[in-house]
Every structure is written in structure tokens, then in C-alpha cells.
Amino acid sequence: MKLIMSLRLVDLNGGTETRTTWIGSGRKSCPLCPEEKFKACYSHKLRRHLQNLHWKVYVEFEGQRMCICHLPCRQLKSSLGSDQAQGRLVAHYHCVVCSVTIARKTDMISHLKRHINKGETEASYSGSSDVPFEDPVPGGQAYEIMKELGTNVQLLPNHTTPQKTDTYFSRKMKTNRQLVFCSLAVLAEERNPLECLDAFGATGIMGLQWAKHLRNSVKVTINDINETCVKMIKENCHLNHIRVEGNRSGRQLDGAGDADSPIASVEVVKMDANVIMHLRPFDYIHLDPFGTAVNYLDAAFRNVRNLGIVSVTSTDTGSLYSKCLNVTLRHYGCQIVRTEYYRELAARMVLASVARAAARCNKGIEVLLAVALEHFVLVVVRVLRGPTQADASAKKLRQLLHCQWCEERVFLKPGSMVEENLYRQLPCQCHGSMPGKTAVELGPLWAGPLFNTGFLRRMLVAAVQHNMEDIQPLVKTLICEADCTTLKTFPVPGYSALSNQVECGVVIKTLQKFEEADTSDQSGKRKTTGEESGNVLKKIKADTSLEHPAFYYSIHRHSIRGMNMPKLNKFLQYLTEAGFRVSRTHFDPTGVRTDATLAQFKEVLTKYSVPTYSSAPPSSAVGSDRRQTL
């Protein structure tokens, strides 16, 4: 009863009937206050309490009223953390449209006005569910059920605000979750079963997708240090008919599933991420903390198995995208400035931190994927064990010389020789024509390739097999960017689903699967023979793409004033005809990745640009000539 009444709206017209259902005969407790704050009493005292405390400060919305709630749905978190001190309870309102909790009445009114302006006037959350709570969430909070990639998860109120909830969930990260899933699916084809870890589970949706679609190919471990998140993950496991290892409650499930025959199993652990990665080895580790992941890189590379994969998602876009330079220097140890290629700069900066962490553990990395979008930066690397591999990766960390006038850039040449004038390495001549210091040194940054063509093609196959239509255009763009070409040798977005499956079947036949590189012994450590590891390394080298150009240029950033530029696809064709390697880039929709220098780039752009006035109709041009003669 508390779960329903704490979020129910009271009709202005039918308020009397609703109140009688609350009060009734005998002693009743307040449905909007905890029992320790207001004990059960008779109807007249309860009526007076409701009128003076809850109904007196209601918020009216669409002919209904929302009363203030004193249940522990919203807690003001203590600075000591949830383990050391309990949060202070805060009176609040529940929004019927989005289920968010807001403390102040004025803020609630403003929040409702924004819903009205967007045309959102109906409730979009579920106050109850067919699946009961085995261990109810504190405060009896309402939740909504969201489905993504065939996986159902229940979300608490304020799930989009990390400061107000522990089980944070962002719908904008769907692309990130699908890219991580495809990378794990590719590794599962090479060897299985895989021991994979979702170090920051939150709602557990990523680990549940792994277990539900890859089944016996993976052994999924979902970890989170928060008790509320662990309870929510277990509930989501039961919601998807997935067995929780170590949970002997054996709750019966209603609907199309049986508790005796779950479709998969996962292990749910409540532990600090650094601790579990130090204690146990894994084949695949995904790090997605709220903010930067640099604090967990050392632990991730300490026990990850040879030829395993580590994927890192960084959401601290303020420091990555050159908005908080002091935080960038503190977290990543890099000196950067705001540039036109700031997203690729962020990806290379994260890879530099990953390479340094791996090198401290005598391991090298092979970059499989680097994506930088609006909300996150995702890098996926393969781990190569040995000091030789670590030295090779460390040599790819270089300083970047960036011209502040024309924004030309080039990585400084490796070596210990002292060069008299570093400006000579820049293709531009800005230093000779401008006084003072015209260039700055940025970094250290990752100077190696950002993509692996063979791995990306297998990811495209996995995306088609699992019906991930949202990321297929992105993966195809990444393949073209890795090869630095405009030629598409894979199914394009206009094809039908059947033709996609047929062509991907051809790709599957041409892409030979990796032989199983590791064999498990009783101690849990995998030993690899020299012949098997050599075969795997040969296939990895065969998949490695050619070195693509380091950076890209934005066609609009270098446009000529008073000139109409050609269309982007036409301009790519003109650069190809001029003899340069060229492709589009996912970092910038108007960006062009090419091996041409900035001067050559501008030369081709100027050649095929036309004056703005030349696009006017001929009749207007004739009229203007007549006016000039008169």
C-alpha cells in the first residue's frame, strides 16, 4: 500500500473518496511518512496530520494534486560515503511524468512547466510490477522497466542523475554498450569460455546483455560496490530469467521461464573494482566509472590474461575536451589546448594513459578501436604480454607540435638528439612570417594507429548477427577510416536485412577464426604453448591495418571567405584524384582524414571552390551590367 500511495495523485474532485480509503476504521499509519516519524493513530488524528502537513503544500498539475512525501525515497548523501554514514532524509515531491524526486515546491512547479512546454502531460513510469521484490528497495521507490537489446532492466527514480541515485543509467550510452558487446562477441569467437568482468555494474544491463546473447561462450561477473546496485542487479537477473550464481533463494518466476532452467547465469559481486581485478584474472574487462577511469587502469592490467581485451569508457568530457585544463593535467598528465581535432586528441590522450598503465605491468597494447562522441570516449585495446611489447608501446608515446596560427600539427620525431629549431618539422611557414612563438608542444599522446581493420570487420558481422542496426553505420565509417579510403567493401545502410546476412555470411567464411590460444589448468591460470601463441600472433598481425594518417581537417574550419565550397563527397573525390589517401571520420561529420598537408588541403579546396556571386541567376547578372553602363 505504501508503494502505491506514496506516488499517487489525489483528484481534486474525488478527494473525499480517496481520503476515506486511506483513513478507514481503526488505527492507520500515514502512507507518506515512515512509521518512526508518525505512528499509527485513529482516523481523526490522521486526517488532521494529512491536512496540515501533506495536503497543505500540494502541487497542482492537470487537475490533480501532488502531496509532499517524507518517505526515504530521497536521501541527501553524506560526504563520508554510504558505507561510513547514512544520508539525511529530505522531504520531496514525485513527478508523475518522469518519476523524478524534487525537494522544493518552486523547483517542482518549474519542472512541470518544462514538461508542459514539451507536450509531456501523461505518466511514463510504472508504480508497480508483476515481478515482486524479494528484498524491497529502501523507501518503496517506484520504478520503470526499460528494454534494450532484448534485455529488461528496472530503473529507480532519478536514474538519469548520478548525484541523486546510486543505480545510474543513461539512455545516451546505448551506442557505447553495443560497441562493447560487439568487441566481446569477436573475442568470444577466438576462444571460449571467456571470463569477463563488468567492473561497474550499476543496473547490470551490460553484463546481462553479455550473458543473455552469448550464453555459454562467456562467464559474466558483474561487480558494484554499492549495496543498492547489487540488489537491483539481482532483481534484473530474475527479471530476465538469468540465474545468479551463489544465490540459493530459488525464487519462482512467473511467465515464460522456469527457475529450474534459466537461460544463462551470472556472478554478482559486491566489491571494490580495484580489489576484484587484483584478486582474479579475466579475459575481458570493461571499465565504465562515472568520470575518469585512470584510477583503475593499473589494477585492470595487473591480472588480465595474455591476448585479452580491456575496454575503457571515459565520460569526463570536461577534462578530455579541453574545458578544464588543470583537471586534464592532474588526471592524464597531458598538456593540451582547444583545437579543431579535440575529439581525436582526447582519444589519443586516453590511449596514452592506458599504454603507460600497461607498460608498468610489463605489457603492451594493440589498439583495436577508439571512438570519441559527444558523451563519452571509448577505447578498446588488446593486451600483449612481455617487456618487448611494453617497450614497443611506450615508444609510440610522443609529443605533438601544434601551430597556433594555421592549426597544422605533426608528431615530433623520436630520438634523443637536440634539434636547434623544432619549427622545421612543421610543414607550414608560419614561424618565418609571424613574430614570437607560433607553436606549442602538446602531450604526451598516443602516436600509433587508432583502429584495427580486421577486428572492425568482425565487429560489423557481430552487429548484423545480433540485429544492432544503430551502430552499423558507425562501424562502417570506422572501417573506411581505418583503411583511409572511400571505397566500401561491405554492405551499406541501404541494403535489405537479407542481403546483409548473405554478405556477412561471405565475410564470416573469409574471416578465419582464431584458434584457442589458452588452455586452463586447475589453478585457474591459463598457459599458452609457443606454437599456439605464435599462430594467434600471426593472425593478429594479418588483421592489422596499414598506418592511417594521424589527424583530420575540418572542411568548414578552413573554408575560404566569399567562396562556395564543394560538397564533402565531391571534395573527397577531388583529393583522391590528386593522389592523396582520404576518408571521412567519425570524430567530425565535416572532417576529412587525409595524408595531405594543410597547404595541399587548402590548395585543392581553393581550386574547386567557386565565388559566391557566380551562383546567382544569369538574368540578375545581366541586369547588374546594364545598371553599371547607365
Image (spheres, rainbow, N blue to C red):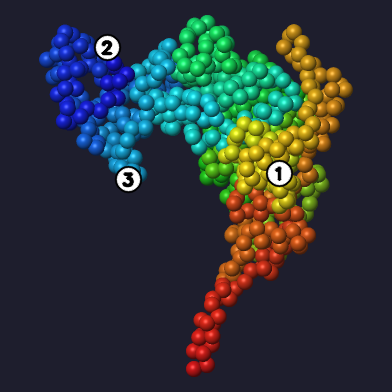
Lower sequence index among marks 1 and 3 = 3
**Amino acid found under the numbered disc labelled 1:** Phe
Between marks 2 and 3, how big is the CA–CA gap? Answer: 40 Å
Query: Dot 2 corresponds to which residue?
Result: 36
Between marks 1 and 3, how big is the CA–CA gap? Answer: 44 Å
**In the image, which disc is placed on residue 117?**
3
When asked about the image quadrant of residue 108, the answer is top left
Q: Nearer the viewer, mark 1 or mark 3?
A: 1
Sort mark 1 into few (<14), some (14-19) or many (20+) by Cα contacts within 10 Å.
some
Furthest residue to the left? 44
Furthest residue to the bottom? 630
Percent across and percent down for residue 65 are: 22, 31
Q: Looking at the image, which residue is at 60% across and 73% down?
A: 611
Query: Dot 1 corresponds to which residue?
Result: 490
Circle 1 sits in a helix, a strand or a loop, which is it? Answer: loop
When asked about the image quadrant of residue 282, the answer is top right
Q: Looking at the image, which residue is at 59% across and 30% down?
A: 293
Q: Is residue 629 visible?
A: yes
**Amino acid found under the numbered disc labelled 2:** Glu
Confirm or deny contact between disc 2 and disc 3 (CB under 8 A).
no
Is residue 256 left or right of 276 when viewed as pictured?
A: left
* Depth check, front residue: 356 or 168: 168
Between marks 1 and 2, how big is the CA–CA gap? Answer: 65 Å
* Depth check, front residue: 281 or 395: 281
Q: Looking at the image, which residue is at 48% across and 24% down?
A: 153
Q: Nearer the viewer, mark 1 or mark 2?
A: 1
Sort mark 2 into few (<14), some (14-19) or many (20+) by Cα contacts within 10 Å.
few
